[in-house]
Image (cartoon, coloured by chain):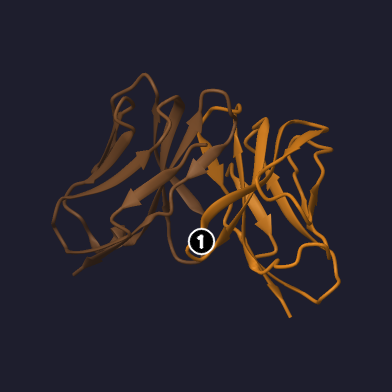
Chain colours: A brown, B orange
């Protein structure tokens, strides 16, 4: 059964820092991996989707990488801003399943 | 604007009552999903549907029911058999079972 973990559980950084959020999964037979952002009391906002054949995806200040063989993905946020404060979740889809397995999330606080 | 609409935003249920949460999408997506989010437990899949008039149980389907009579709509009923229904409920959709997923803004259900 696929299990997804995220480290750290919480992170607090000063504005302007570059930071890395980690996502690990136990079964490397994935179809894709998606990173989301969730603000308190809100739904999930899609940030980046990486297909299993890809190594990375970029959108603005965000860059996500995928290493299937080691079961890891990282989300890199450049020049962090207070508006980046949120919980970041990763989710993986298996090759033979239709549904995401979510990690518990990393709660990020960017201090002005 | 295209998107996923969940209603109501807040819902209160008395003991023994059934309540129905609405999820509508105008993205022309085939697949729709219901997740439950509890503090410290991440997102867990309740039900999903790949096509109209077909749906499958997820990991925690007991005490819930769904229907998929139209492509745009996937309502979730929380029945009196669900012993601990207080949670944040999230609806999602995707173009196909393995494509990028998009989420609604959620419904917070509280038992009073």
- For this view, does B80 lie left or right of residue B34? right
Q: Chain of mark 1?
A: A
| Quarter occupied by residue B32 | top right
Q: Residue at x 39, y 23 (%)?
A: A52
Residue at the outermost top position: A53
Instruction: Identify the image quadrant of residue A108.
Output: bottom left
Q: From the image, which quarter does the C terminus of chain A lie in?
A: bottom left
The image shows residue B37 at horizontal and vertical percentages of: 56, 59
Q: Position of residue B94 (x, y in %)?
A: 59, 34
Q: Where is residue B95 shown, x and y percent of the image? A: 59, 29
Compared with A44, A64 (above or below) is above
Q: Nearer the viewer, residue B107 or A104?
A: A104
Query: Can you tell which quarter of the image residue B49 is in?
Result: top right
Where does the image place residue A97, in percent across and percent down from the top left? Answer: 58, 29
Left or right? Give the position of B9 relative to B15.
left
Residue name at image x 79 percent, y 31 percent = B52
**Relative height, residue A21 to residue A93 (above, below):** below
Q: Element at badge 1? A: loop
Instruction: Answer with left or right where residue B48 lies relative to residue A37.
Output: right
Q: Residue at x 48, y 37 (%)?
A: A2
Residue at image location 55% in from the left, 27% down from the top: B98
Between residue A10 and residue A109, name the one nearer to us.
A10
Q: Nearer the viewer, residue A36 or A91?
A: A91
Residue sitting farthest toward the front: A1
Q: On the image, numbered disc 1 is attached to which residue?
A: A42
Q: Residues within 10 Å of mark 1 (few under 14, many from 20)?
A: some
């Amino acid at each position: 059964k696929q299990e997804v973990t995220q480290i750290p559980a919480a992170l607090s950084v000063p504005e302007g820092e570059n930071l890395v959020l980690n996502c690990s999964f136990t079964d490397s037979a994935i179809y894709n991996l998606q990173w989301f952002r969730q603000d308190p009391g809100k739904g999930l906002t899609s940030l980046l989707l990486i297909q299993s054949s890809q190594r990375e995806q970029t959108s603005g200040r965000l860059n996500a990488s995928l290493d299937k063989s080691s079961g890891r993905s990282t989300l890199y946020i450049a020049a962090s801003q207070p508006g980046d404060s949120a919980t970041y979740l990763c989710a993986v889809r298996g090759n033979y399943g239709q549904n995401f397995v979510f990690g518990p999330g990393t709660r990020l606080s960017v201090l002005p | 604007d295209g998107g996923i609409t969940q209603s109501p935003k807040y819902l209160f249920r008395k003991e023994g009552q059934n309540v129905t949460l609405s999820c509508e999408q105008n993205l022309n997506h085939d697949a729709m999903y219901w997740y439950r989010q509890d503090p410290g437990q991440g997102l867990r899949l309740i039900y999903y549907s790949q096509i109209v008039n077909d749906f499958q149980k997820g990991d925690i389907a007991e005490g819930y029911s769904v229907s998929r009579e139209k492509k745009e709509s996937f309502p979730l009923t929380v029945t009196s058999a669900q012993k601990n229904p207080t949670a944040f409920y999230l609806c999602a959709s995707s173009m196909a079972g393995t494509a990028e997923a998009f989420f609604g803004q959620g419904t917070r259900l509280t038992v009073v």
